[in-house]
Image (cartoon, coloured by chain):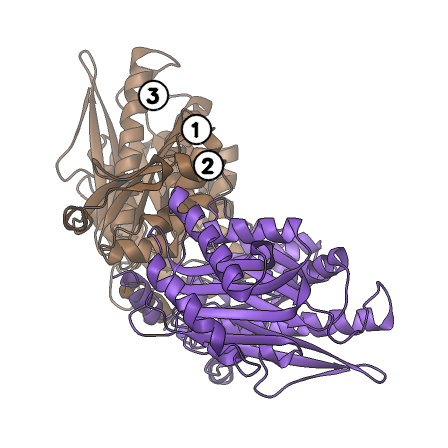
Chain colours: A brown, B purple
């Protein structure tokens, strides 16, 4: 059994402190976050598949691969430290070792993450001064400050936590995340940091995280892009003393709660997508294979034509079936049916049943579901997308300047 | 040797007549076009790869597969006759046979095409009355009327012709086309009809067309979509008496001219993309394979983030390299270099040389080239794309209503 903690954050988990400050990378807003646990954590991570990877991401990947004790994560927003060549590598390493030194821990115990503009060197003086300033501010209430400090074009702070109730004990999962533009399957300008006080082996932690990410962050789309910096990090500091062993009752409880937390985070990223006014769930059923169900879900979620129609509250099922048709999935057009929430719009053999008033009312809601049944198999998948408004263009045509 | 004919059209080719009228599918604008050659034509075609195919497209595909004499093409805009089930099939066939009957030819000599809204039955009475009205209007000056009648959200009429000069004779290639939204690799809401008076075998004609389409229409992108109705049709009525045999001098002249015509048509479709303000050529060089060069070209051409940056005249090379990085192509980030027109912006090893003023001036032009060199091989490809403006959203969020 689990429940969401009101105003929960990454610091809801016992043993985790955090802070978020302005250090001078952005013009005014908070731009530096630090997460810290005195107890060392086992760490797992999933990373962008973009072949252009930012320096901090490569460094963090290496730490997670090699080291077993992680105590801190230092994150800046406003500058991605991507495509910055050797300078970028040197800067990321300097941030890591400076932060470790100031915290009195080892460089291999510090993870580094960045998000923001590509191709510009970090303002290192500001950043290192920032590290000096942020350490004394670490606190058990600092989660939301940290969440605020990792935002770029996000409109809302993303901070959630879950309490898992076991027989006589509790495990916590806390999180902060950021998203907005460039969200597409397989991690895109998206950062998520999750804390837990469970005690768990490294391989099992990685397996559970990878599965959760696959059902959540890899099923969302804002604009079909995949960025250079994206990562989901899960730190387990074992403070609860409760050990998670594969296939134990605790294991299933933990897995379910983590899945749920990742879905909540992923949905919050989509619904706060650049210029988004609606959060739309795409349920694909009746596919010939899981791969096909995902191809269809991804194609509909990424379709600029579907997303603009959603913005206009237009029940344009033609664009939905067309997006399914060019997804590459097996598909027999006559077998496809489509519903908006529980109202069937398109039956098999292209029988249309479109009560424009009723449907337009559904489509005007800030949240609804489109169900597409391919009618040829038993596989399914769930995706989340947002609509596509003029605001997306406005934000992205002058983001850099 | 060849040159473009001023104000050329599909009727620039000897033996071809055309007309375009309003018949009552749209509210006011021309919506029915007819192309006719008394001399029968050999026909070749390339068709959408979307698994959802419109009724008229399936019918036309069948005619081209089976029959060797084509004399007419009847095209309506405003309604795609797609996802219309059995009714749609019956309607497409009725249009074909009614048109054949009225022209005094066989149904198997008539091709049918539609473009417009998906999922609505055609207003058949208006359409058949339209066929009655349009036949007497067929003329050797009717090409541009036909071009106008196949437009949907296009802003400009697309009508071009080329004259090929041989030793003592001439061959003509005439065309009309339409595009606008939903243009993406492999034919998307895009219709193109090409006439020629060359004498040529069916297989050779198809091969030459497929190759030309691959280097032109399949290398353009407005919004990454692929539609249900798209086709490129080439009709050769042999009126010139000049026979094109494989690998003859005429063959190479003809092939070059057709390639050029298809590129001109494709570029005109991109530069008239929904809400487009700029036509951008993407030259990919130094790729490890042609497939990779195309993956990179396609990914950059389709990137919403690149396209919004182009709209904002923002020299955001970070988004370009990021789009290349998630294209799936082999890529070593440090080896990539990027130029805008002839100005290098990014050298290998992330050495940036960005004269913002100069580059912003280039990016404010209505037409420019972005060159990305992957630096790891010898393969290349050329793509064309447009920028992405608020206008695209506006058009597509209330297109149907």
Numbered badge on residue A199: 3
The crowd level at tag 1 (other Cα within 10 Å; few <14, some 14-19, many 20+) is some
The crowd level at tag 2 (other Cα within 10 Å; few <14, some 14-19, many 20+) is some
Relative to B203, is B216 above or below? below
State yes or no: discs 1 and 2 in contact (Cβ < 8 Å).
yes
Front position in the image: B65 or B382:
B65
The percent coordinates of residue A136 (x first, y second) are: 24, 49
Of pointers 1 and 2, the one earlier in the residue sequence: 2
Secondary element under disc 1, as helix, strand or loop, is: loop
Q: In which quarter of the image is residue B134?
A: bottom left
Numbered badge on residue A376: 1
The percent coordinates of residue B364 (x first, y second) are: 45, 82
The residue where tag 2 is placed is A332
Pair 1/3: label in front: 1
Instruction: Give the alpha-carbon distance from disc 1 to disc 2, as whole Å.
Output: 8 Å
Same subunit, tags 2 and 3: yes
Report the residue that reaches farthest toward the bottom: B6
Residue at point 73%, 74% (across, down): B239
Of pointers 2 and 3, the one earlier in the residue sequence: 3
Front position in the image: A115 or B384:
B384
Front position in the image: B249 or A271:
B249
Q: Across the whole image, how many numbered discs are drawn on residues?
A: 3
Of pointers 1 and 3, the one earlier in the residue sequence: 3
Instruction: Give the alpha-carbon distance from disc 2 to disc 3, as whole Å.
Output: 49 Å
């Amino acid at each position: 059994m689990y429940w969401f903690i009101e105003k929960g954050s990454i610091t809801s988990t016992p043993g985790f402190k955090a802070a978020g400050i302005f250090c001078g990378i952005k013009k005014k807003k908070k731009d530096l976050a630090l997460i810290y646990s005195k107890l060392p954590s086992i760490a797992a991570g999933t990373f962008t598949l973009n072949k252009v990877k930012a320096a901090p991401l490569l460094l963090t990947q290496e730490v997670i691969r090699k080291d077993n004790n992680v105590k801190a994560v230092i994150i800046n927003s406003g500058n991605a430290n991507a495509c910055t060549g050797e300078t970028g590598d040197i800067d990321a390493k300097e941030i890591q070792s400076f932060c470790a030194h100031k915290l009195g821990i080892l460089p291999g115990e510090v993870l580094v993450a960045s998000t923001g503009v590509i191709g510009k060197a970090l303002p290192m003086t500001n950043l290192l001064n920032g590290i000096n300033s942020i350490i004394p501010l670490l606190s058990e209430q600092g989660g939301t400050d940290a969440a605020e400090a990792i935002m770029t074009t996000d409109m809302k702070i993303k901070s959630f936590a879950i309490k898992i109730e076991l027989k006589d004990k509790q495990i916590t999962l806390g999180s902060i995340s950021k998203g907005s533009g460039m969200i597409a399957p397989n991690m895109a300008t998206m950062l998520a940091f999750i804390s837990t006080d469970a005690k768990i082996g490294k391989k099992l932690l990685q397996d559970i995280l990878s599965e959760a990410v696959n059902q959540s962050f890899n099923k969302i789309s804002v604009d079909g892009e995949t960025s250079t910096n994206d990562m989901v990090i899960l730190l387990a500091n074992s403070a609860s003393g409760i050990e998670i062993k594969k296939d134990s009752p605790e294991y299933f409880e933990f897995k379910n709660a983590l899945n749920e937390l990742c879905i909540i985070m992923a949905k919050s990223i989509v619904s706060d997508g650049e210029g988004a006014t609606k959060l739309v769930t795409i349920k694909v059923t009746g596919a010939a294979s899981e791969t096909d169900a995902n191809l269809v879900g991804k194609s509909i979620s990424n379709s600029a034509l579907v997303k603009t129609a959603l913005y206009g509250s237009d029940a344009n099922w033609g664009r939905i079936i067309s997006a399914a048709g060019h997804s590459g999935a097996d598909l027999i057009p006559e077998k496809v049916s489509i519903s908006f929430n529980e109202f069937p719009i398109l039956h098999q053999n292209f029988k249309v049943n479109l009560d424009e008033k009723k449907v337009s009312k559904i489509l005007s809601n800030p949240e609804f579901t489109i169900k597409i049944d391919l009618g040829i198999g038993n596989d399914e998948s769930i995706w989340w997308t947002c609509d596509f408004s003029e605001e997306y263009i406005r934000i992205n045509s002058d983001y850099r300047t």
